[in-house]
Amino acid sequence: MSIETKLAELGLALPPAPAAAGNYLPSVRTGNLLYLAGTICVRDGVVTHVGQVGREQTVESGYEAARVCALNTLANIKAATGSLDAVARFVLVSGFVNAVSGFPDSPAVINGASDLFVQVFGEAGKHARAAVAVAGLPRNCAVEIQVVVELKS
C-alpha cells in the first residue's frame, strides 16, 4: 500500500507544501539523506496553535500542533521527492516547543509528530529525537519540528 493511501485511510490529507519564509530551502538532499527545514504549525497560511504551551496552549493542544507540523513536513518531503514512497526511513526529529520557563513535558508534545510518523510509516517512521522547550518560535507558534529522512536508493 502506498503511503498516500495509508494517509487517506487515517483520514489525513497533505496540505500544500509550505514555502520558505526566508533565504533558505525547504529541503536539501545530500546522498540518500533529505534534510527538511523547520516546519511550524501553519495551515493555509494561518498559525493553528499560537502561544506558549503551559500558558495559552496545553500539552494536548501542543500535541495537535506537532501533528500539524508533521503533515507540513510530509508535504515538503513529497514536494522534494515527488512521492512519500521515496522515504526509506525517518532518521531524526528535532522538536521545539514554545513553552513557559521550566516546562517539563516537551517529549509529550513532540509525540504528536513522532506518533504520526509511526502511524503512517510503521517501523520506518521510528527515529532518533530531541524534544526541547524554547522561549519563542517564529510567528509565536506553539511547535516547530526539523526532520531528516533517508531516501530509497
Image (spheres, helix red, strand yellow):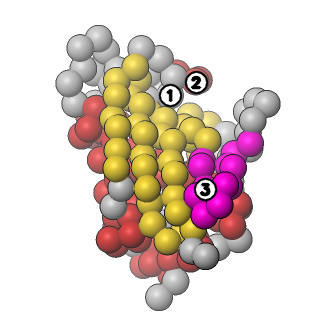
Q: Secondary structure at mark 1?
A: loop
Compared to 107, does 121 lie above or below?
A: below
Q: Are marks 1 and 2 in contact (CB under 8 Å)?
A: yes
Rendered image quadrant of residue 65: top left
Q: Dot 3 corresponds to which residue?
A: 34
Q: Dot 2 corresponds to which residue?
A: 138
Q: Which residues are magenta?
A: 25-36
Compared to 131, does 89 lie above or below?
A: below
Q: Dot 1 corresponds to which residue?
A: 141
Neighbor class of circle 3 (other Cα within 10 Å; few <14, some 14-19, many 20+) is many
Between marks 2 and 3, how big is the CA–CA gap? 23 Å
Q: In percent of the image, x 40 and y 20: which residue is there?
A: 134
Neighbor class of circle 1 (other Cα within 10 Å; few <14, some 14-19, many 20+) is many
**Nearer the N terminus, badge 3 or badge 1?**
3
Q: In percent of the image, x 36 and y 55: which residue is there?
A: 127
The amino acid type, in three-letter code, at marker 1 is Cys
Is residue 3 found left or right of 28 in the rendered image?
left
Circle nearer the viewer, 2 or 3: 3
**Nearer the N terminus, badge 2 or badge 3?**
3
Is residue 6 found left or right of 42 in the rendered image?
left
